[in-house]
Structure formats: C-alpha cells, structure tokens
Image: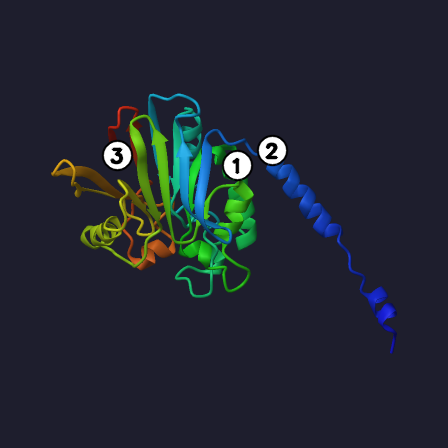
C-alpha cells in the first residue's frame, strides 16, 4: 500500500479546468453591455434580491418607457420557438426606451417528474442556461427584473436554482419568489411593479383570472405580472387609498397581466396536458412621462 504522498501523486489535484472556466466567465462578463440606468436594491436573501429600484430620471431622457414582459420561454425544449425569442429581443433593442420584465420558466430543464420527457430536450440543463444567456446577452442591460419559475427550480435537488445561474451570468436582479420593482420616471414617483411566476394548473380564463386577482391583492403595486399558465390575459381593477388630511378617497388604477409562452403546443406535452394552442402574446406596458400608463398585448 502506498504512502499518502504517493496516493496524491497517483491522483493529482489539477485546476486547469477551473482556470479555463474563470477565464471564460471573465471574458464573457467583460463583453456584456454595461448598465444604462441607475439601480439600487434591498431585501437580499443570499443571491436573491426582492426589492429593486430604477432611476430613469437620472439617465437617458425618454418621452415614454415601454416595459415588455417575457415569460415561459422554456428554452431547451424542442417546442421552444427560438425565432420568436430573437424577434422579441430585437424588438426591444430596436428602440432605446424599451425594457423587459422576466417572469420565469426561461429554460426548460427537464426533470424525472415532468409531464414532458428527456427526449424533448436539445441539451442538458446547464447547457440550456449557457445557450440561453448567450442569446440574451446583447439585451441584458434592458432587463429590469427577473423571478424564477418551477422550471428554474427543477435543478435544486441536483445542483441548485438555475435562475441564480442565469442571473449571475447576465448580471441581473433575481428572486425565486416575488420581486417588487420601483420605476422612477417623470411623474411616476415611482411606478410600482410586482412580479411573480404563478402556480397551479388553471385551464379556463376564469380560474386564471382568480389566480391573478389574488396576486393583485398583495401589496401596493400598480402593475402585476404573472406567467406559468401559458394563456394571455389582462385584468384591470381599482384600489382605494385614503388621504386623512384631505378627508378624501383616491382611486388608483391597477392592472394584472399574464403572458402566454414561447412554446409550441402541437407535438409537445402542452397538447397532452390540454393547453389551448396559441401564439406568443406578452404584456406590454407603456409609461408616459406625465404619469399616465396603459397595458396592451404584443
């Protein structure tokens, strides 16, 4: 039996691969576009950031801001419409007043308990993350917030939350639950947004609306964005706010929206699970400098 030193000699500890990984990441991060807007954050839980604030009044001047929701991309699945991903990414980059809010399931990351199958994947989960980040890297400076979904969390039993890895690669604020975002822009002081991926398996517009409305009852945001259910929906409402000094009640507009997905239906587990076939429709919010705002679907 050999000595400890000889055993170590038989199985040397080599760090060449670690060095190569470090060099790759350093070069990757150096090539990322820089931030365009001043950001501050709070409520940090490890790698997660629950509260994010963006100051558009100290950056480039815009007459309007357009905030595009991106949700349920499920990159890495054979049914993911990569052409539509590029279309939406390029649309955001085509004007300097367009930004994004991500609401989860950005990669597919098949798991044994998924209704899909491993044969529907184009790559392993880590490779999906790397390819996805390369695809979105040119637009990373336009991402104002990101909440993970059930697909990001599928990897937790194996090696951790893939949303953390995506956020680290792209240098964007991430939460695996909810995320509150303040947007300071003109007379919006600030415009308040809540992001949440969603949950459940709603199949009708009514049950989707119920899930969205429960989310809209949390906190004091004006815009509530949700994904997960693969069906587009906009739900407007009003909230009452007291002004004791003026003895008045003020009504404030509140809108909740659900984006669809970037997934094909036919020939995938979406068809088997009973999802309605449809194309990509994402919520698009337009903020005017005078304090007015609206939500449409794009």
Mark 2–mark 1 CB contact (< 8 Å) = yes
x 47%, y 62%: residue? 111
Does residue 169 appear in the picture of this structure? yes
| Mark 2 → mark 1, Cα distance in angstroms | 9 Å
Of callouts 2 and 1, the N-terminal one: 2
Of callouts 3 and 1, the N-terminal one: 1
Residue 143, given in percent of the width and then of the height, sits at: 44, 37
Residue 46, given in percent of the width and then of the height, sits at: 51, 54
Q: Secondary structure at mark 2?
A: loop
Q: Which mark is residue 70?
A: none
Does residue 282 appear in the picture of this structure? no
Residue of label 2: 31
Residue of label 1: 137
Q: Secondary structure at mark 3?
A: strand
Relative to 58, say whether 267 is above or below: below
Left or right: residue 203 compared with residue 155: left
Residue of label 3: 296
Residue 270, given in percent of the width and then of the height, sits at: 34, 54
Residue 74, given in percent of the width and then of the height, sits at: 43, 49
């Amino acid at each position: 039996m050999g000595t400890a030193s000889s055993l170590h000699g038989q199985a040397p500890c080599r760090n060449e691969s670690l060095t190569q990984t470090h060099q790759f990441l350093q070069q990757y991060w150096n090539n990322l576009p820089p931030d365009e807007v001043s950001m501050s954050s709070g409520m940090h839980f490890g790698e997660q950031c629950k509260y994010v604030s963006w100051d558009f009044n100290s950056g480039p001047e815009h007459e309007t801001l357009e905030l595009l929701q991106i949700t349920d991309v499920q990159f890495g699945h054979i049914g993911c419409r990569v052409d539509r991903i590029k279309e939406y990414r390029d649309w955001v980059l085509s004007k300097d007043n367009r930004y994004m809010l991500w609401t989860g399931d950005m990669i597919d990351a098949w798991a044994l308990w998924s209704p899909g199958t491993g044969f529907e994947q184009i790559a392993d989960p880590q490779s999906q993350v790397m390819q996805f980040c390369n695809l979105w890297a040119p637009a990373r400076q336009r991402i104002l917030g990101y909440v993970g979904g059930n697909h990001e969390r599928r990897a937790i039993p194996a090696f951790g939350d893939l949303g953390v890895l995506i956020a680290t690669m792209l240098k964007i604020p991430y939460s695996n639950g909810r995320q509150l975002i303040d947007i300071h822009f003109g007379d919006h002081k600030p415009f308040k947004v809540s992001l949440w991926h969603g949950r459940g398996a709603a199949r009708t517009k009514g049950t989707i609306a119920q899930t969205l409305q429960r989310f809209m009852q949390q906190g004091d945001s004006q815009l509530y964005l949700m994904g997960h259910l693969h069906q587009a929906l906009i739900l407007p409402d009003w909230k009452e706010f007291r002004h004791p000094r003026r003895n008045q009640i003020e009504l404030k507009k509140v809108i909740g929206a659900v984006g669809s997905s970037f997934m094909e239906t036919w020939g995938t587990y979406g068809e088997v699970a009973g999802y309605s076939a449809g194309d990509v429709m994402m919520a698009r919010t337009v903020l005017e400098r005078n304090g007015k705002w609206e939500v449409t679907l794009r």
